[in-house]
Amino acid sequence: MTPHYLEIFTGNNDFALSYHSEAYAFKMSASPVTVPAYWPKPNYVNPESRKGGAIAYNTVLMVVVVTIVSLRYYSRVGVLKQRLGLDDFFIGLSLVSLC
């Protein structure tokens, strides 16, 4: 059985972390300091917005969550003929806090 060991290398403005074990090994390296020079210039005047996608994504997920909670309440009260319990109360409370 090989032992686990961690190696840290520094030098020439580089940083590398290497972890070795019996099951796997990986190496993480920091980007060189020259990489940010190739990034595009920021657009502060008319920035790109992802607001529409975020609203659509959240709306779809909210519809899914309300549907699932409604089906749970229906199955508990309508099908099984049981009262709603404390867990159902907290599920409803968390659903209201999401909206």
Image: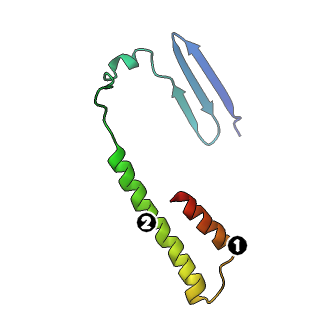
Q: Which residue is mark 1?
A: 86
Give above or below for 97 relative to 23.
below
Residue 87 percent coordinates (x, y): 67, 71
Disc 1 crowd rating (10 Å Cα; few below 14, some 14-19, many 20+) is few
Q: Residue at x 56, y 78 (%)?
A: 73
Q: Position of residue 10 (x, y in %)?
A: 58, 15
x, y (%) of residue 24? 59, 40
* Image position of 62 with respect to 2: above or below: below
Asked if the residue under mark 2 is in contact with the one under mark 1, i.e. CB atoms within 8 Å, the reply is: no
Work out how far the residue at label 1 is from the one at label 2, CA to CA, in angstroms. 23 Å
Q: Residue at x 62, y 90 (%)?
A: 81
The label on residue 63 is 2
**Left or right: 90 as drawn, with respect to 50:** right
Q: Does 63 sit above or below residue 30?
A: below
Which residue is most to the top?
A: 12
Q: Hey, what amino acid is under mark 1? A: Leu
Label 1 SS: helix
Q: Residue furthest left?
A: 46
Residue type at mark 2 is: Val
Residue at screen point 55% across, 34% down: 26
Give the structural element (helix, strand or loop) at label 2. Answer: helix
Question: Is residue 72 found left or right of 83 in the rendered image?
Answer: left
Q: Which quarter of the rendered picture does the N terminus lie within?
A: top right
Residue 20 found in image quarter: top right
